[in-house]
Image: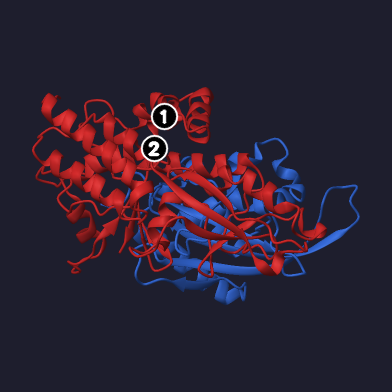
């Protein structure tokens, strides 16, 4: 597939400009929406939508500024700790990026709490950090919320019935790999993930953990191809978040009469009779007519699932 | 067609199987009961709560009184039943995966992180210890034709790994 040079350069400039505004000029959470929406508008003119590395990288590089504050009731020192600022990758998981946050606040909490697992809260709700960071922000941040994202840090009363205990990075890895394998079961009956070697799995995990796009995609590419002589995945791996949980359903990327299904079709299958549902992912609302196969190949999180949040 | 393979358990089959389990349980007063989220196609599942006294290993003379809550639900992606559970200590806190492992001699040889992991409950979407479903199909396949209740047949294989014992009345349902 190819597109015209004019298209590429215009697009690249646009992205660069918007990238700047994302965090400096306009600190509202909606900027990314404009950027990706713009991308989709450009895309409409192009018939072939596959193999687009640029959008993969754009999604990969998405970051959110977060301001962590220790819960006032947990401060055991006479000094109030300073807040801790961090740029976190949307595609990562909080337990992978908060070692420094823990270290920063540890000396301000009572000694007996220091051994306990830290957890995070926003607006009175514990953050289910088993979900990728970008998903949590899509679920919890409204259009009027300003960045940085203000998150409260706790050391006591871990909300164990809602939040995963990730005592070690290995446990996050095990959860992540379980999601990735499930996605492959949906796409290729699990044949690609199970035929991979341990080193491939490690490469995916290290690529995500160390934020190395090339390292991750060198392996993930195989998972994101339709296998054999097929042009499409068997089913589209997705989670659609609603009512404090999420829905899953077996949805095929093509209809029985061989038409490409769109996001609209997916939502109609998931919520029959409800025409007005819109979903958000990566901070933007993708157009309803986006083909599912393309959406899955390009806007899936590293766990290979599309994470769609009903707005 | 909702199943991944021609030879697999449909949601309807699964629902029938767990209904039979609850009926037998009612006769035995064994404690299995239904729960349902009507919004989901795989919304039906069954629950059983049980107190158990376990010790860490042969040398450990401390007995741990634990409350197990078992759930059997249907995983849509894999098209298989899943056995998930949580365990509470007497002080009301939940057992961690490592703590559970220490109490579980039977898993010594296998990789803890691959066999039992915390996963989202297929209906409740909250963390539960789960026997990973990736091998369930393999275990179930021979039962799909032969057993009248493949869910029970599968439970007789995997239950012992998580201290879930089945009365033989259930096993009779299979033939």
Horizontal placement of B148 versus A118: left or right?
left
- Whichever of labels 1 and 2 marks the residue nearer the N terminus, that label is 2
Q: How is the image coloured?
A: by chain
Residue located at (34% from left, 70% from top) = B39
**The N terminus of chain A: image quadrant:** top left
Give the vertical position of A138 relative to A233 (above or below): below
Q: Nearer the viewer, residue A68 or A307?
A: A68
Mark closer to the observer (1, 2): 2
In which chain is the residue bearing label 1? A
Q: Which residue is mark 2?
A: A61
- Single out the residue that lies furthest toward the front: A25
Q: Colour of chain B?
A: blue
Query: Chain drawn red, letter?
Result: A
> Where does residue B175 sit, x and y in percent of width and height?
49, 56
Which of A234 and A129 lies nearest the eye of the viewer? A129
Q: Quadrant of residue B38?
A: bottom left
Q: Are marks 1 and 2 in contact (CB under 8 Å)?
A: yes
Q: Which residue is under mark 1?
A: A213
């Amino acid at each position: 597939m190819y597109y015209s040079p004019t298209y590429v350069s215009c697009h690249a400039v646009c992205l660069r400009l918007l990238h700047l505004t994302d965090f400096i000029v306009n600190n509202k959470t909606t900027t990314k929406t404009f950027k990706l929406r713009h991308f989709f508008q450009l895309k409409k003119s192009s018939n072939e939508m596959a193999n687009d590395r640029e959008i993969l990288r754009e999604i990969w590089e998405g970051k959110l500024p977060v301001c962590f504050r220790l819960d006032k009731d947990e401060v055991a020192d006479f000094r109030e700790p300073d807040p801790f600022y961090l740029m976190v990758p949307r595609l990562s998981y909080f337990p992978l990026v908060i070692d420094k946050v823990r270290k920063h606040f540890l000396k301000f909490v009572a000694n007996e709490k220091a051994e306990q697992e830290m957890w995070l809260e926003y607006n009175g709700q514990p953050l289910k950090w088993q979900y990728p960071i970008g998903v949590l922000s899509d679920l919890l941040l409204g259009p009027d919320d300003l960045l940085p994202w203000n998150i409260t840090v706790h050391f006591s009363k871990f909300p164990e019935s809602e939040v995963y205990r990730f005592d070690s990075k290995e446990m996050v890895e095990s959860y992540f790999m379980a999601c990735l394998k499930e996605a492959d079961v949906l796409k290729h009956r699990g044949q690609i993930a199970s035929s991979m070697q341990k080193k491939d799995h490690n490469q995916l995990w290290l690529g995500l953990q160390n934020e190395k796009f090339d390292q991750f995609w060198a392996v993930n590419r195989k998972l994101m191809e339709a296998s054999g002589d097929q042009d499409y995945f068997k089913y589209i791996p997705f989670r659609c978040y609603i009512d404090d949980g999420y829905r899953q359903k077996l949805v095929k990327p093509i209809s029985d009469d061989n038409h490409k299904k769109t996001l609209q079709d997916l939502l109609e299958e998931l919520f029959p009779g409800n025409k007005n549902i819109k979903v958000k992912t990566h901070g933007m609302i993708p157009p309803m007519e986006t083909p599912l196969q393309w959406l899955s190949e390009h806007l899936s999180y590293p766990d290979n699932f599309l994470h769609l949040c009903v707005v | 067609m909702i199943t991944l393979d021609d030879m697999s358990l449909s949601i309807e089959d699964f629902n029938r199987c767990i209904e039979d389990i609850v009926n037998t349980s009612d006769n035995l007063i064994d404690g299995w009961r239904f729960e349902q989220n009507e919004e989901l196609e795989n919304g039906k599942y069954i629950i059983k709560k049980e107190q158990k006294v376990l010790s860490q290993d042969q040398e450990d003379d401390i007995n741990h009184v634990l409350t197990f809550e078992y759930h059997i639900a249907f995983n849509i992606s894999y098209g298989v039943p899943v056995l998930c559970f949580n365990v509470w200590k007497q002080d009301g806190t939940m057992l961690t995966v490592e703590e559970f492992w220490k109490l579980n001699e039977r898993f010594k040889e296998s990789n803890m992180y691959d066999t039992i992991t915390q996963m989202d409950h297929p209906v409740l979407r909250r963390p539960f210890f789960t026997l990973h479903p990736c091998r369930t199909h393999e275990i179930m396949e021979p039962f799909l034709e032969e057993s009248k209740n493949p869910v029970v047949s599968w439970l007789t294989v995997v239950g012992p790994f998580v201290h879930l014992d089945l009365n033989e009345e259930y096993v009779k349902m299979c033939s």
